[in-house]
Image (tube, helix red, strand yellow):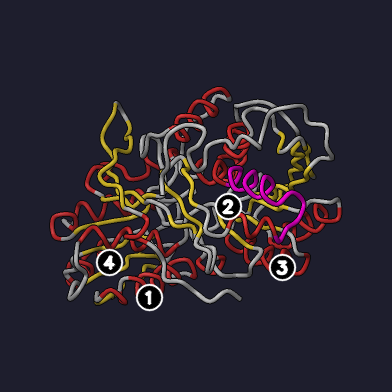
């Protein structure tokens, strides 16, 4: 199923888990990098349309993430084109397709969009999808801008592949900053004994181990209901940092047990801040956990953030974890079309090394491998009424969490 739109609206439309998901400022105003370019809008859109395929998870396990991405993409496109939905007189025609988180469906949808004339494919909520669409972009010489998919493998995948969100390395590096110099520090990964949990274990060993930490793990059966023995193991390892990666319906029980067993009094406990509906899963442990965060409401405040928040509000929605990804993707689309027209190689050149302001702050697309260098955040949850809301603790500069450069494939 696909849907086509070419709107002039500033609004958007209307897990999940407590786990980490397994992705130079200028003068304010129109001349600021990332702000709407004068050439992007204005005049009457009378040229042939520029076609963009938006392939994302409208349904499936990551549908909540996909909805945030899609809504904020619309807001970002409106912002970057000054409300015209046109670039250099050409309307931007966006065709949506639901991949449901299935790589095969994504490849079919992207292939269909390319066959219909799309020179840009954006989306990819799931990492598995992004890794299948990237080679398709290379084979067909079209621009691919991956979205919330966090897998590090998207960076450097090929010259036609970019990303509008963060990557796993940046998540883990953010966690590491919470204990300062990692040399000689002990880190324990607390996760389920599953592919997801083991991937997090491997990621922490690769990132924080390389910074001097000794990394151990406590892996828990996914169906576990009694977490006391595993909490005891954590206390026995006496880590300086406990990195929790968890996905499942037993999350609240797990957090409650860690609190009851005194884990929070003996070690720094950190996990990824997920979307708003998951904040209640932490129970009474919510205000004891340190959170690494890609983005959340109140994490930043600049013209792009204000445009994102205002545009989403018009559609009855709020800023959340992946709303930055969609907005930035639209900025990248407009930049590519403004400088490259329908010449994809010129689009690539226009994006490589581009520095601009996104809703979360100063962004830079590293030319060598297309990593998106960006700020990251640490946060805490504070009690508000019967629930919790995130509060900014620190903003980390892009250089502080930048992944090492990789060779472009």
Tell whether 340 sits left or right of 209: right
Q: Earlier in the sequence, mark 3 or mark 4?
A: 3
Q: Earlier in the sequence, mark 1 or mark 3?
A: 3
Q: Residue at (29%, 45%) from the top-left corner?
A: 379
Is residue 244 depicted above or below 184 in this figure? above
Q: Quadrant of the C terminus?
A: bottom right
Q: Quadrant of the N terminus?
A: top right
Q: How far apart in space, not on screen, are marks 1 and 2 (Cα)? A: 23 Å
Neighbor class of circle 3 (other Cα within 10 Å; few <14, some 14-19, many 20+) is: some
Neighbor class of circle 4 (other Cα within 10 Å; few <14, some 14-19, many 20+) is: some
Q: Nearer the viewer, mark 1 or mark 3?
A: 3
Q: Which mark is residue 138?
A: 3
The residue carrying mark 2 is: 147
Q: How far apart in space, not on screen, are marks 3 and 4 (Cα)? A: 46 Å
Q: Earlier in the sequence, mark 4 or mark 2?
A: 2
Q: How far apart in space, not on screen, are marks 4 and 2 (Cα)? A: 35 Å
Q: How far apart in space, not on screen, are marks 2 and 3 (Cα)? A: 17 Å
Q: Secondary structure at mark 4?
A: helix
Q: Secondary structure at mark 3?
A: helix
Is there any visible trace of residue 14 in the rendered image?
no
Tell whether 233 sits left or right of 223: left
Q: Residue at (62%, 29%) from the top-left corner?
A: 82
Q: Which mark is residue 230?
A: 4
Q: Position of residue 398 (x, y in %)?
A: 37, 56
Tell me the magenta residue range: 329-345
Is residue 292 depicted above or below 403 in this figure? above
Q: Earlier in the sequence, mark 1 or mark 2?
A: 2
The residue carrying mark 1 is: 206
Tell whether 234 sits left or right of 144: left
Q: Earlier in the sequence, mark 4 or mark 1?
A: 1
Relative depth, front residue between 130 and 290: 130
């Amino acid at each position: 199923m696909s849907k086509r739109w070419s709107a002039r609206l500033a609004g958007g439309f209307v897990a999940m888990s407590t786990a980490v998901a397994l992705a130079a400022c200028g003068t304010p105003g129109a001349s600021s990098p990332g702000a709407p370019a004068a050439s992007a809008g204005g005049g009457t859109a009378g040229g042939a349309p520029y076609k963009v395929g938006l392939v994302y998870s409208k349904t499936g396990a990551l549908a909540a993430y996909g909805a945030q991405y899609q809504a904020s993409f619309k807001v970002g496109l409106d912002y970057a084109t000054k409300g015209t939905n046109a670039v250099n007189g050409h309307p931007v025609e966006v065709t949506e397709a639901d991949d449901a988180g299935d790589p095969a469906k994504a490849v079919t949808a992207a292939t269909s969009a390319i066959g219909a004339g799309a020179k840009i494919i954006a989306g990819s909520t799931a990492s598995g999808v992004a890794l299948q669409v990237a080679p398709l972009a290379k084979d067909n010489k079209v621009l691919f801008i991956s979205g919330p998919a966090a897998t590090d493998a998207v960076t450097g995948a090929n010259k036609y592949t970019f990303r509008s969100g963060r990557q796993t390395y940046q998540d883990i590096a953010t966690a590491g900053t919470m204990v300062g110099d990692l040399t000689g520090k002990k880190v324990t990964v607390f996760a389920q004994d599953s592919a997801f949990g083991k991937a997090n274990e491997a990621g922490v060993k690769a990132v924080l181990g390389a910074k001097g930490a000794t990394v151990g793990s406590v892996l828990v059966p996914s169906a576990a209901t009694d977490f006391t023995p595993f909490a005891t193991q954590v206390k026995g390892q006496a880590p300086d940092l406990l990195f929790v990666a968890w996905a499942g319906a037993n999350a609240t029980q797990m957090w409650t047990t860690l609190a009851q067993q005194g884990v929070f009094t003996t070690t720094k406990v950190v996990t990824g801040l997920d979307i708003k509906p998951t904040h209640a899963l932490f129970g009474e442990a919510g205000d004891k956990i340190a959170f690494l965060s890609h983005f959340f409401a109140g994490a930043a405040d600049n013209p792009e953030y204000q445009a994102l928040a205002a545009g989403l509000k018009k559609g009855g929605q709020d800023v959340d974890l992946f709303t930055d990804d969609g907005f930035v993707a639209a900025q990248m689309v407009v930049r590519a079309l403004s400088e490259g027209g329908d010449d994809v190689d010129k689009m690539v050149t226009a994006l490589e090394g581009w520095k601009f302001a996104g809703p979360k702050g100063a962004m830079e697309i590293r030319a060598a491998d297309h990593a998106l260098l960006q700020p990251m955040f640490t946060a805490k949850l504070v009690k508000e009424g019967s629930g919790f809301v995130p509060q900014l603790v620190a903003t980390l500069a892009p250089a502080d969490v930048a992944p090492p450069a990789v060779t472009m494939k």
